[in-house]
Image (tube, helix red, strand yellow):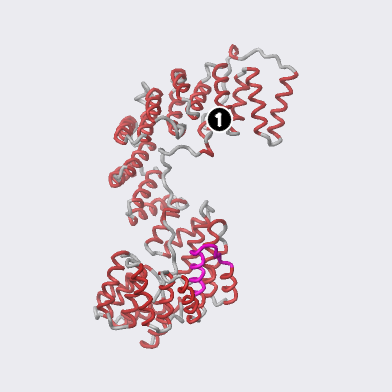
């Protein structure tokens, strides 16, 4: 009876997702939009807009204080000093410099005041008008913002377009929804020919759950600028969020066909397919992207995870090992995956190497797996020391440590010791399905079939739909008894729940072999062997091949399993009985 080495982490932890336009900006970056509004763009100052301020000794000292504070790493003091200078001089050049300081230090109120000083002093400045409006909206002072709309609309179309595309980032979470719509409509009044204006309206309506209106605005934008990237991506996003993923997929497929060179369309299509549980199609699109851009990080990670979900561990390793070389933000999680994959491939020294590279918040998970890896390498003392380091602060951690200790003793060829530990633990946790399952595994290993069946049936009584337990009990009955009729409903229930799980596929294949259904058994076991290289799966497949007369193929498959683990009980048994 087998327990899978690999513990899958939810794909949602790693899948890259489209940043939703409906989300409010992060508080830690509340000035990010203002920074994008070309604060530092040089202007041709009009002489009549510049004040005739005398450079007094007092002002000179204040200029020096502001600059020295900045040079000495005191930006807050520098910002306050330049704010005071702007108030005193009303000079638009100083106001602009002070605004840069306020933006850099995240001072929203100061930045708003300075944008007003700037725009009042230089009414011809389009940049000042745009910043004043942006800051009023960001501060949720919508009445002030409304008063600034008419001057703002005098800005040239390129400036308006950029503003419209960032408008959704400015709204405060507490902004009145009706005011958001009203202000957006006024800001874009008379600009129907600009797809950016249509886009801004679409986002505003979508933020208020007015999906139909938002989609209509996007259609209008696409009518004026066919297959425009922002509108295409946002329309697909809204369709997906509106529970219409099939429509989104068809639309994105059309977009890829029309604009095959746009990587963003292919990435959006792949994500949408993955979200719709169409993993095979998603992986195909990611691989198309990698054929064009082999180093695309999102495609490497996502293709690797999809391969992993489908139990194609060699492909998963290829993609994820290429991804981790780029040192992405989630590199530690990828290293954890790679260590687990190497365990699956019986490459325990390599697994140890990957786990040793894991740091940060993923490090405890790597440390939890390390004792068993060391035990599989025969390093008893190192395995026991690694066990001692495992945390026991919570009940969950205590049970996990007990499980790992039992597995270590099993891998050190002392299953009785592991069984003893689990028996003691079950006195304190009598309803732990995990502990019952692990003890059953060790009982089966020692040939105590009655005890194994008792523990598994008790576990099923607690969790009747546990796929792991259903498979384990069915497999014990198939492998150790003649009660095939009792085993069949258990295994069929398990395979219905997880049709792509190679461990369960192997169990069903072995059941069909025991039932004398040789052709069916070959089909099932070939599928299992194609998905995972496991010595027990190899032993089963080799025996069925041998029985069917395909002895050369049987020897080849058996040799692969023997290389993985020459001492595995299934390998030893087949070798003894068939002379392989």
Q: Toward the viewer: 143 or 54?
A: 143
**Is residue 403 one of those drawn in magenta?**
yes
Whether 26 is drawn above or below 490: the answer is: above
Q: Toward the viewer: 300 or 236?
A: 236
Whether 462 is drawn above or below 418: the answer is: above
Question: Is residue 562 toward the left or the right of residue 87 in the image?
Answer: left
Q: Residue at x 46, y 82 (%)?
A: 567
Q: Is residue 41 visible?
A: yes
x then y, percent, for residue 463: 35, 67
Q: Is residue 347 visible?
A: no
Q: Quadrant of the N terminus?
A: bottom left
Q: Which residues are magenta?
A: 389-407
Q: Quadrant of the C terminus?
A: bottom left
x then y, percent, for residue 62: 71, 24
Q: Residue at x 46, y 81 (%)?
A: 566
x then y, percent, for residue 482: 28, 83
Q: Which residue is mark 1?
A: 108
Prevailing SS of the magenta stretch: helix
Whether 74 is drawn above or below 556: the answer is: above
Question: Is residue 417 toward the left or the right of residue 577 in the image?
Answer: right
Please state the total of marks drawn on the protein image.
Answer: 1
x then y, percent, for residue 185: 37, 25
**How busy is the neighbourhood of tag 1: few (under 14 within 10 Å), some, or many (20 plus)?**
some
Question: Is residue 73 toward the left or the right of residue 11 in the image?
Answer: right
Q: Toward the viewer: 206 or 91?
A: 206
**Is residue 138 one of those drawn in magenta?**
no
Q: Residue at x 43, y 24 (%)?
A: 157
Q: Determine the secondary structure under disc 1.
A: helix
């Amino acid at each position: 009876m087998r327990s899978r080495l690999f513990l899958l982490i939810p794909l949602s932890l790693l899948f890259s997702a489209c940043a939703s336009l409906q989300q409010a900006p992060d508080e830690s970056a509340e000035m990010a939009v203002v920074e994008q509004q070309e604060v530092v763009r040089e202007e041709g100052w009009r002489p009549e807009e510049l004040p005739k301020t005398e450079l007094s000794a007092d002002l000179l000292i204040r200029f020096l204080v502001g600059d020295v504070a900045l040079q000495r790493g005191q930006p807050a003091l520098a910002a306050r000093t330049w704010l005071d200078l702007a108030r005193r001089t009303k000079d638009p050049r100083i106001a602009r410099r002070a605004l840069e300081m306020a933006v850099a230090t995240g001072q929203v109120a100061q930045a708003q005041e300075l944008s007003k000083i700037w725009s009042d002093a230089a009414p011809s400045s389009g940049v000042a008008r745009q910043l004043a409006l942006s800051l009023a909206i960001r501060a949720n002072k919508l009445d002030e913002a409304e008063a600034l709309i008419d001057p703002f609309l005098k800005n040239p179309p390129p400036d308006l377009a950029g503003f419209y595309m960032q408008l959704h980032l400015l709204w405060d979470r507490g902004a009145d929804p009706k005011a958001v719509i009203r202000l957006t409509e006024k800001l874009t009044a008379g600009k129907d020919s600009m797809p950016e204006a249509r886009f801004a309206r679409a986002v505003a309506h979508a933020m208020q759950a007015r999906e139909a209106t938002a989609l209509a605005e996007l259609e209008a934008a696409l009518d004026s600028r066919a297959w425009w990237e922002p509108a295409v991506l946002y329309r697909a996003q809204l369709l997906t969020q509106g529970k219409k993923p099939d429509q989104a997929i068809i639309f994105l497929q059309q977009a890829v066909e029309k604009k095959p060179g746009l990587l963003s369309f292919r990435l959006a299509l792949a994500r949408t397919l993955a979200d719709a549980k169409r993993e095979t199609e998603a992986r195909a699109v990611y691989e198309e992207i990698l054929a064009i851009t082999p180093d695309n990080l999102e495609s490497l990670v996502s293709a690797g995870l999809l391969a992993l979900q489908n139990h194609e561990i060699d492909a998963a390793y290829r993609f994820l090992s290429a991804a981790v070389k780029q040192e992405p933000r989630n590199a530690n999680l990828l290293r954890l995956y790679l260590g687990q994959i190497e365990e699956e491939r019986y490459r325990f020294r390599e697994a140890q190497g990957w786990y040793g590279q894991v740091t940060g918040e993923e490090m405890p998970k790597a440390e939890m797996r390390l004792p068993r890896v060391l035990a599989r390498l025969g390093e008893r003392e190192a395995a026991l020391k690694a066990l001692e380091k495992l945390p026991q602060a919570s009940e969950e951690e205590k049970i996990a440590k007990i499980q790992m200790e039992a597995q270590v003793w099993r891998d050190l060829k002392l299953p009785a010791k592991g069984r003893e530990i689990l028996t003691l633990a079950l006195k304190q946790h009598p309803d732990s399905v995990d502990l019952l399952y692990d003890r059953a595994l060790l009982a089966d290993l020692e040939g105590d079939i009655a005890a194994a069946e008792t523990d598994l049936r008790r576990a099923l009584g607690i969790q009747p739909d546990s796929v792991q337990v259903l498979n384990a009990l069915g497999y014990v009955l198939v492998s150790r008894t003649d009660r095939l009729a009792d085993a069949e409903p258990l295994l069929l229930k398990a395979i219905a729940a997880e049709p792509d799980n190679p461990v369960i596929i192997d169990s069903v294949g072995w059941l069909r072999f025991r039932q004398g259904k040789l052709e069916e058994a070959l089909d099932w076991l070939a599928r299992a062997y194609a998905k995972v290289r496991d010595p027990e799966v190899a032993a089963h497949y080799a025996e069925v091949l041998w029985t069917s007369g395909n002895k050369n193929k049987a020897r080849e498959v058996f040799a692969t399993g023997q290389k993985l683990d020459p001492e595995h009980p299934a390998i030893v048994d087949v070798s003894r009985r068939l002379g392989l």
